[in-house]
Image: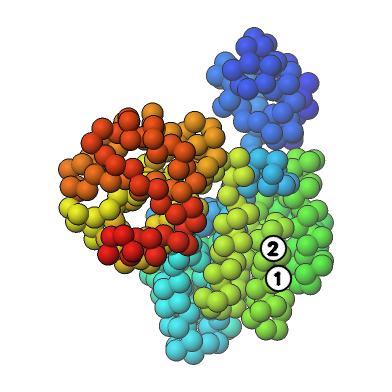
Amino acid sequence: MSLSGIQIFKMMPKKNCAECGVPTCLAFAMNLAAGKAELAQCPYVSEEAKEKLASASAPPIRTVQIGVGDSVAKAGGETVLFRHEKTFNNPTALGCLIATSEDDASVDGKLKAFKALRYDRVGLTLKPDLIAVKDGGDPARFAGIAKKSSDAGAALVLMSDNLDALEAALAEVGKNKPLVYAATEANLDAVSALCKEFDCPIVVKGANVGGVAKMSTKLMEAGHKDIVLDSGSRSTAELLRDNIMIRRLALEKLYRPLGFPTIVFPCEMADNPVDEAIVAGTFISKYGGIAILSDLRGELLFPLLLQRLNIFTDPQRPMTTEQGIYPINNPGADAPVLITSNFSLTYFIVSGEVEASRVPSWLMVLNTDGLSVLTAWAAGKFVADLIAPFMKKSGIEDKTKTRKLIIPGAAAIISGDLEEELQGWQVAIGPREGAHIPAYLRQNYA
Ligand code: SF4
């Protein structure tokens, strides 16, 4: 049962030292009760209080892990309703459905797509996470496809209403902690026992949100911790309503039976791939923990992965690239040297344009705390005083004989200072726009 802020406050150290980020223990207790703080932020809580507060300080939506090792998908762990309040934590895990009724060519094609569809963007690899294997009345094939999918590196969802089929598949891949779909009114105890035996996360599927809450309560009483919710709705409007209701009750009322991630099935909610992708996009935004697609097609998956990236990026922390020297197009000792900031978007635009020029180059990336060039200059982070020592310490002088540094046109104002600070180097002013880099490099250095 959750505790009120006042109940929590009674167990606080009452030092009012503000080390937790708020001025008083009372304010911290209120935040803790509202799920907006974590107990670990106070270094002075007694062990006795920690035990008592464990349930009150647990995240309002549990993080559920599916899979093991490198093949892991995580869902849940969210603490806010809106991304701008703090950040969303675990991106919607995207999966592909494979039914046992599909022929081998289709199964192999989907597994091949699962392994092949990888996109490197802003220093991250965007990819699908899961395969959902659906039993169509053939337990041996169900277990076989589950094994094949697991071998392909996928975290798994095992979907069947046949306990024998689930057991056969779990005997093959149970050690990889697949998500078992689904416990319903009809089979709750039996599926619960199976998931406990194999220590696997479990989906509870109801006819509505109330039904799901009742069953998840029973599962919690039976000792299950890793639960995923399916409200049973398969129309976009109803599922959207259910997901919002679940998220609000979990976060605002700390209603534990709904404090779990949800699974949604765009594959069952549209009759063509484009509509299905639109449905999936809706639930990446509102509040699908796991979304299962009927197929993996690059032209539809990629926009979903990008949408997911945008929504689950921390809005308060710019994405950054590591400071350092980046060789592009196999540069040698005569290759030109360019410099830019470590805002990921800037880096990827500049590096992409340098690569497109086909001119072998060294790209220096300065740590500007994720600010773009002009903003960094205005904030005093892309200035001669910082660039010169970075260049000297970076080791670039051992890699190239070139002593001409191309700075972004947007930072032309620093060229004089930089030439003074960076002894032995000439400063050249490059283009203002990334799109003009290829022509500039080809004209001057090809
Ligand atoms: S760090 Fe702990 S003791 Fe200090 S104000 Fe916060 S809750 Fe109170």
Q: Does the residue labelled 1 lie within 8 Å of ligand 1?
A: no
**Disc 1 crowd, CA 10 A, few/some/many (<14, 14-19, 20+):** many
Image check: 187 left or right of 178? right
Q: Kindly state the secondary structure of the residue where label 2 is placed.
A: helix
Q: In which quarter of the image is the N terminus?
A: top right
Image coords of residue 139 (percent x, y): 51, 79
Residue under circle 1? 279
In-front residue for pair 122/326: 326
Image check: 11 left or right of 151? right
Q: Compared with residue 178, is residue 432 higher up or lower down, i.e. above or below?
A: above
Q: In which quarter of the image is residue 424?
A: top left
Look at label 1 and name its amino acid. Answer: Val
Q: Compared with residue 249, is residue 130 higher up or lower down, i.e. above or below?
A: below
In-front residue for pair 376/171: 376
Residue under circle 2? 283
**Disc 2 crowd, CA 10 A, few/some/many (<14, 14-19, 20+):** many
Residue 6 makes an appearance in the image: yes
Image check: 215 left or right of 414? right
Image coords of residue 433 (percent x, y): 49, 56
Q: Do the residues bearing badges 1 and 2 touch, measured as CB atoms within 8 Å?
A: yes
In-front residue for pair 122/429: 429
